[in-house]
């Protein structure tokens, strides 16, 4: 715990050191981990390649840093508390020692099925402890896991199986969603009609019927029989990939963000302990799904590396009623609670009645992640959940950054509603204007970049390094470009303004507009479409689609429903447009480029000033679109 920041001056001191002597700063932090072989050099980098290597030539295994290093000290401590979807079902509490044995045993089973270091393994599972065991078992043997959110469709899963070249899929029979059972294995089967893996391992959760293909599909509880519950962790290089996580970008195809082993390990533990001010014995709860980066870094790796007790919740915030989160906090005496603005706004809509029956006195720290939190939601969260005494850490980061980059240190950095406040140690931000000039000083607004490497940053996009360079390192020379707009106020505090590219953030889920357009265009009667985000009270942003169709034999209503179904099938229900407007034409420039600025304005409902439309091929299109607005 020597790397803990305890005071505001301590934060400024550490920050200063991390900038003036980054290598000795990170070497000091990294020295508290267990290395099979210490590194030769802390950092080698250029953002041209990009080529970033941390803890060069170090050898380690991340799971040894969770288990072997600590089992003697706290093997009996609870690592995972699992709260099932159904409140009446038994809670599971898994100690570090038990988790260690389960991870070893399952990793031995993976090896028996021929899975080796470097192989890609897809994890498509509900929020059950076995999902974390699956991730850690892969890490144990050096297989690269790629968790796919279990809400994605078969089609989206197929794309990820093919792109990653996965050898195996770890899944479950089904998943509980409120009082419904959703077939998960059936989706895997469908995905495997258009792709192939050697092995599928199925964990039993709902007990529903599944089809098992002989020679390919195995039950989890059967493959572990006879496997030893210990082994020697595979020796990994610092820069060996730990996992791939697919995320959306401005083009249609999802990007496989690659994170490497040592830097990710060092940074997630360091930020977890500091941002949340976690103390041993605390119960920490992050409500994200392990299918997203937040689940990777701040349900599984960060907390477990820090010896924390991490709560995993299988259900949804409104089942069986909108008091569920508060009931779980009371039941497990949660100390740190980390959720998304969209969940806060959704629960805020029910008022304070659902909170009243519960005792929330255990809470010490509240967190927010995934999208900008509006001031109103911030205040509601602060007053009603935190009882005006718990600091809120508004944590800004991305799949690509691996860990939190901008956030208050709980209880130490003075907060301001809707501000992510200050960069964490090691994070050198730059705000740039459209030409790439850095805007120095306070009271400036522009695009957010990072100008120096940090340990958990993206290394490449799986199979496409050129795209990695182009997406993140080419817009502004010598800098990592985040895709977010930002304001630095008169106090030097950062406020994230949202995406400046063609990515929208729906309920904290990142979605590429091109990806949604591609899905819409799969409908046989669709000729062309354009998708934009618009402000949505609960979701942050909603999806607004303008579609040109061949209306033959359809009512508009039928067509709209069919298009929604198509998107649900191609990507998943999370990508279903909230509004679809059938149009006869789209506003295009003479060179054929869609003017999204106009479409965004119409979707927002701010149609009085459309700006300059003289460059449009057919300015009448705009009038028609405004008339037909949903
Ligand atoms: C947005 C989630 C404002 C931002 C960890 C970023 C935020 C994108 C915040 C990454 C925040 C995340 N305030 N905006 N505290 N946190 N974002 O990859 O636009 O799912 O670029 O990672 O979410 O989303 P991702």
Image (cartoon, rainbow, N blue to C red):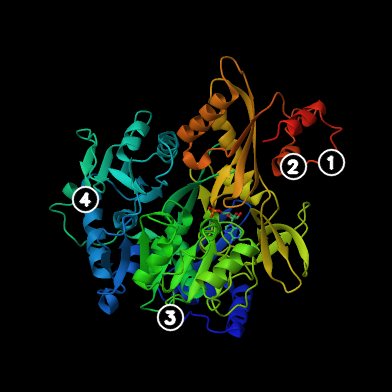
Q: Earlier in the sequence, mark 1 or mark 3?
A: 3
User: How far is mark 4 from mark 1, CA to CA?
Assistant: 62 Å
Q: Are marks 1 and 2 in contact (CB under 8 Å)?
A: yes
| For residue 322, above or below residue 211 | below
Mark whose residue sits in front, 1 or 3: 1
Neighbourhood count class around disc 2 (C-alpha, 10 Å): few under 14, some 14–19, many 20 upward: some
User: How far is mark 1 from mark 3, CA to CA?
Assistant: 56 Å
Q: Which mark is residue 611?
A: 1
Left or right, residue 282 beside residue 509? left
User: How far is mark 3 from mark 4, CA to CA?
Assistant: 35 Å
Left or right, residue 473 beside residue 333? right
User: How far is mark 2 from mark 3, CA to CA?
Assistant: 50 Å
Q: Which residue is mark 2?
A: 601
Extreme residue toward the front, this view:
353
Q: Which mark is residue 1?
A: 3
Q: Is mark 1 within 8 Å of ligand 1?
A: no
The image position of residue 192, as x and y in percent, is 34, 32
Quadrant housing residue 334: bottom left
User: How far is mark 1 from mark 2, CA to CA?
Assistant: 10 Å
Q: Residue at x 72, y 25 (%)?
A: 585
Judging depth in this view, the residue of 229 and 366 nearest the camera is 366
Q: Are marks 3 and 4 in contact (CB under 8 Å)?
A: no
Element under disc 4: helix
Q: Can residue 239 be seen here?
A: no
Q: Which residue is mark 4?
A: 109
């Amino acid at each position: 715990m020597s790397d803990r920041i305890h005071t505001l001056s301590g934060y400024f001191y550490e920050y200063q050191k991390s900038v003036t002597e980054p290598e000795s700063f990170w070497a000091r932090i990294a020295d508290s981990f267990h290395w099979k072989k210490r590194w030769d050099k802390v950092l080698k980098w250029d953002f041209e390649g990009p080529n970033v290597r941390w803890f060069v030539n170090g050898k380690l295994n991340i799971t040894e840093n969770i288990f072997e290093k600590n089992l003697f000290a706290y093997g009996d401590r609870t690592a995972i508390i699992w709260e099932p979807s159904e409140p009446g079902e038994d809670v599971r509490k898994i100690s570090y020692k038990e988790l260690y044995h389960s991870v070893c045993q399952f990793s031995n089973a993976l090896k028996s099925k021929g899975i080796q270091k470097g192989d890609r393994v897809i994890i498509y599972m509900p929020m059950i402890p076995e999902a974390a065991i699956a991730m850690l078992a892969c890490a144990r043997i050096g297989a690269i896991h790629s968790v796919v959110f279990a809400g994605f469709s078969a089609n989206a899963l197929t794309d990820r199986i093919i792109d990653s070249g996965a050898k195996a899929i770890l899944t479950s029979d089904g998943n509980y969603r409120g009082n419904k059972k959703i077939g998960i294995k059936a989706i895997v089967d469908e995905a495997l009609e258009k792709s192939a893996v050697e092995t599928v391992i199925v964990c039993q959760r709902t007990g529903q019927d599944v089809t098992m293909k002989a020679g390919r599909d195995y039950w989890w509880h059967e493959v572990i029989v006879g496997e030893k519950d210990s082994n020697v962790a595979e020796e990994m290089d610092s820069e060996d990939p730990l996992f791939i996580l697919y995320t959306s970008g401005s083009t249609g195809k999802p990007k496989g963000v690659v994170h490497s082993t040592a830097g990710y390990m060092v940074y997630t533990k360091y930020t977890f302990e500091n941002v949340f001010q976690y103390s041993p014995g605390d119960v920490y709860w992050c409500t994200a799904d392990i299918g997203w980066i937040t689940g990777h870094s701040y349900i599984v790796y960060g907390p477990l590396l820090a010896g924390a007790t991490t709560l995993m919740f299988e259900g949804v915030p409104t089942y069986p009623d909108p008091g569920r989160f508060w009931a779980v906090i009371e039941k497990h005496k949660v100390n740190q609670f980390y959720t998304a603005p969209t969940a806060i706004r959704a629960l805020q809509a029910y008022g304070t009645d659902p909170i009243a029956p519960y005792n929330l006195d255990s809470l010490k720290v509240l967190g927010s992640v995934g999208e900008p939190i509006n001031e109103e939601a911030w205040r509601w969260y602060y007053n009603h959940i935190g009882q005006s005494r718990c600091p809120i850490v508004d944590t800004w980061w991305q799949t690509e950054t691996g860990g939190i980059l901008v956030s208050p240190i709980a209880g130490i950095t003075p907060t301001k509603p809707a501000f992510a406040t200050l960069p964490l140690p090691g994070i050198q931000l730059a705000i740039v204007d459209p030409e790439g000039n850095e805007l120095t000083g306070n009271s400036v607004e522009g695009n957010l970049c990072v100008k120096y490497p940090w340990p958990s940053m993206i290394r490449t996009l799986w199979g496409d390094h050129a795209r990695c360079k182009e997406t993140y390192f080419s817009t502004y020379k010598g800098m990592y470009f985040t895709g977010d707009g930002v304001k630095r106020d008169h106090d030097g505090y950062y406020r994230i303004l949202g995406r400046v590219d063609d990515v929208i953030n729906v309920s904290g889920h990142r979605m590429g507009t091109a990806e949604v357009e591609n899905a819409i265009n799969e409908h046989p009667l669709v000729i062309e479409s354009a998708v934009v985000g618009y402000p949505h009270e609960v979701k942050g942003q909603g999806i607004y689609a303008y579609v040109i169709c061949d209306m033959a034999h359809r009512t508009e209503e039928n067509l709209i429903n069919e298009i929604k179904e198509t998107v649900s099938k191609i990507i998943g229900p999370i990508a279903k447009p909230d509004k679809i407007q059938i149009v006869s034409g789209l506003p295009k420039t003479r060179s054929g480029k869609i003017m999204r600025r106009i479409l965004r304005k119409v979707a927002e409902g701010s149609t009085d000033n459309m700006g300059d439309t003289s460059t449009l091929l057919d300015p009448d299109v705009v009038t028609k679109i405004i008339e037909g607005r949903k």
